[in-house]
Amino acid sequence: MWPTLLLIIAANGAPVLAGRLLRGHWWAPVDLGLRLPDGRRLFGPSKTWRGVVAALLVCTALAPLLGLSPWIGLAAGALAMAGDLLSSFVKRRLGLAPSSRLRALDTLPESLVPGLGLMLPLGLDATDLLLLVILFTLFHWLASPLLHRLRIRRQPW
């Protein structure tokens, strides 16, 4: 369960770090500006291809260091980003602004989607999954304000 948690944390942090390191370079929103019939963006401007690619690359490179296949790392990164995009999609449908805060929705999909997707290949059980979600949520709640103070994150959440 611990390697999975580290991969999810890495997937969550990679887009933030890539954004800070690359500034405006290679920035393109995943939704390409698409608006749904409700007039709102599909995901919003803060979900970029740069961030998705960063999460995939970091998780793929990190997995062997954790004793896992690079394919597991790639899957973890992809599933974490899918959870993040799901969260953004739901927030847009609720009329919330990009990067707005909604505690459970900020962390649950990003940890639950990869946790569920990796249960079988990594032999995780329901207890592992619950612990994964709880630990990721606690990490996110504690690390985000610190990263904001260090000027790595724009918002403290």
Image (spheres, rainbow, N blue to C red):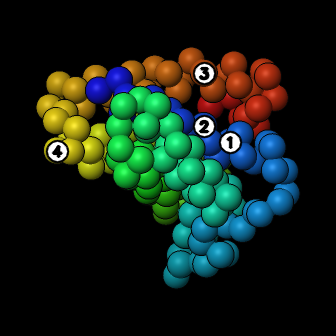
- Rendering coords of residue 9 (x, y %): 50, 32
As measured in the structure, the alpha-carbon distance from the residue carrying label 3 to the one carrying label 2 is 10 Å
Total labels: the figure holds 4
On-image quarter of the C terminus: top right
Q: Give the numbered dot on residue 120.
A: 4
Mark 1 belongs to which amino acid? Val
Question: Looking at the figure, which quarter contains the N terminus?
Answer: top left
Q: Residue at x 22, y 26 (%)?
A: 128
Q: CA distance from mark 3 to mark 1?
A: 13 Å
The residue wearing badge 3 is 143
Q: What residue is at 17 percent from the left and 25 percent from the top?
A: 127
Residue 113 on image: x %, y %: 33, 47
| Residue 83, image x, y percentages | 42, 51
Amino acid at the residue labelled 3: Ala
- Mark 4 closeness class: few <14, some 14–19, many ≥20 residues within 10 Å: few
User: In the rendered image, which residue does mark 1 sit on?
Assistant: 16
User: What amino acid type should be assigned to the residue bearing mark 2?
Assistant: Gly
Give the crowd class for mark 1: few <14, some 14-19, many >=20 residues within 10 Å.
Answer: some
Which residue is located at x 52 percent, y 43 percent?
61
Marks 1,2: beta carbons within 8 A = yes
Q: Nearer the viewer, mark 3 or mark 4?
A: 4
**Crowd around label 2: few <14 · some 14–19 · many ≥20 (10 Å):** some
Which amino acid type corresponds to the residue marked 4 in the rendered image?
Leu
Q: Which mark is residue 13?
A: 2
* Residue 99 locus on image (x, y percent): 65, 46
Q: CA distance from mark 1 to mark 4?
A: 29 Å
Give the quadrant of residue 27: bottom right
Query: In which quadrant of the rendered view does residue 66 lie?
Result: top left
Marks 3 and 2 in Cβ contact (< 8 Å) = no
